[in-house]
Image (spheres, helix red, strand yellow):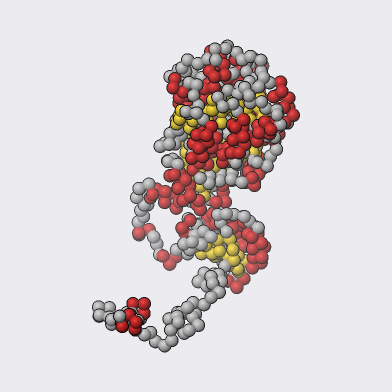
Amino acid sequence: MAFPEIHPALARALASQGYAEPTPVQAAVLAPDAAGRDLLVSAQTGSGKTVAFGLAAGPTLLGEAEKFGQPGSPLALVIAPTRELAIQVAKELTWLYAPAGARVETCVGGMDPRREQRALNVGAHIVVGTPGRLKDHLERGNLDLSALQVVVLDEADEMLDMGFREDLEEILDSAPVGRRTLLFSATLAREIVALAKRYQRDALRIDTSRRDEPHGDIEYRAVRVAPNEIELAVVNVLRFFESPGALVFCNTREGVRHMHSALRERGFAVVGLSGELDQKARTDALQALRDGHARVCVATDVAARGLDLPELGLVIHADIPVNKAGLLHRSGRTGRAGRKGTSVLLVSHTRRRKAEQLLASAGIEAVWQGPPTADEIRAKDQVRLLEDPILTEPMAEEDLALAKLVLENRTAEEVAAALIRIHRARLPSPEELYDDARMRDSQVREQGRPKRTYDPSDRGDRGDRPERGERDGPFGKPERLDPNEVTWFRVTVGRSKNADPKWLIPLICRLGHVTKPDIGAIKIFDRETKFEIANAVAAKFSQAVKATADEEIKIEPSGPPGGPTSPPRSKFKPAYGKGASNDGKPPHRKGPPTKGFAPKAPLGAPGPKAGKPPWKKKSNDQRAK
């Protein structure tokens, strides 16, 4: 479907950018019934909303004129929630309105307000800004809205969530009553509808989001990973997919700093984005991504709000999103404008149920798999090398002459081997990861497939079978420590969360700053796991685990299995029974049970008739009546 008839200047801009047909939201705002009206639009992220409201505002701003006149007070105002999104919108509108001679200016937090003041004094046709900075210019008299014809609220739901309601209301109250108001939001929540009723007139409601199905251009994968190997899994996922651009999400600033340092240490071209960075650092990081100097961006949800990075084909959730909206927003950074993308959730054993619930609430069917292995990555590297364009590009005469000189002194095999070494040298090495087979089997069973079968004759003598929790792992069998020289600890994961020594031992070593020989017996129960630590390092181990902030797994001192594990839950003695102060008698009674507390009869024999409870008996006054 081709674009409908639009302003000639805008049509030339679209043709120069290679736009052949409109997206659903662009077609909806260009429909005849939307012409000249206020619009309340709900559309998925990455659906071309910026171009959509740019095209929708064109007839109002330009009319029959071929180009804009001299810049003065702004004719259009676009409000966006974040600096990055505002700058991105300004760039999109700049090329869209370039043939019409539009002057587009930005007013965003973190930038020099004096420069913005000078730009506004010179004049602009379109102003794009964040609510706080626009309100500041409005109150100082730098921003004149008297000539405003169109107001656009981009990602209005995010602006309300970020607490910009008062700023938005002040800006909209200052705009002319007869202007058009275009409100774009990912969701049409109650607050958005209330805002639209107050500031829009006879708005046309457009909903192009597909609520019954996930984004069709995004492939979702859930990767099983041990809790202590999240960082290594990120490395292998990045190496396996080798996307020109990748975005790794962490839930905290500290997580961003740690992941950024880990990836940079392994040789990735990576930048970090979090709310603690100043505007210059954020701008430099984004520019490095757009220039291709960096290939990976590690960010929090807030820092990545509104990012539209070129060639972003991979999103990795190093930390699982807190809700469905976070999952869809993060994943929506890829698969944009018709391009395909992949969204990978790294799911530890302790977070598997949370991930399943999150995917189900979003209506997403993810492909469950183990982490990419080093052998799989090397196999893909071989394919990529053979398909590298450098082997098929035409050779210059100078290159051919040098190649002949090299072949005079080296064999073809030696030259090819050198090429392979050069190719591998620029690639970070893959990591060896552990894939829990029991977690994989539980996934198979939940999908309706039969459990694995085995031959009972192959079970051997059960007396020779190692005790559960003491089976060999990648670090060998735990040491047998002297029972009188150990301290017992407990970790808050057990069989219900797929606890296994294969990943518990390295986790205990990492959190407690000990080595494998310092760990003795390991006993796994349904909801917890108890283990021995040598007394020589027990004090150091206890201090280390106290200083570790892990919201999923906690380690604390404990008694040995079968012994007391914690102090009594209450300081009060029971009313009766074991430990009671009244010799096990029912509360508030002396002597043997009286009428109303009938003893149990033998099985099959009729029991004695119990007396009526005291509250059922009639008083003397009631009998007299």
Give the side of residue 613 with respect to residue 259, left or right. Answer: left
Q: Is residue 108 above or below residue 324?
A: above
Q: Is residue 344 above or below residue 470?
A: above
Q: Is residue 230 above or below residue 572?
A: above
Give the side of residue 465 with respect to residue 11, left or right. Answer: left
The residue drawn where x is 50% and y is 28% is: 201
Which residue, as the protein is rendered here, is positioned at the far right?
114
Please state the horizontal and vertical placement of residue 482, each as a whole percent of the image. Answer: 59, 70
State the quadrant of the C terminus.
bottom left
Observer-nearest residue: 330 or 192?
A: 192
State the quadrant of the N terminus.
top left
Observer-nearest residue: 351 or 592?
A: 592
Q: Is residue 500 visible in the rendered structure shown here?
A: yes
Give the side of residue 377 with respect to residue 277, left or right. Answer: left
The residue drawn where x is 52% and y is 22% is: 56
Observer-nearest residue: 373 or 71?
A: 71
Observer-nearest residue: 73 or 467?
A: 73
The residue drawn where x is 49% and y is 18% is: 20
The answer to which quarter of the image holds residue 147 is top right
The answer to which quarter of the image holds residue 118 is top right
The residue drawn where x is 49% and y is 43% is: 324
The number of discs equals 0
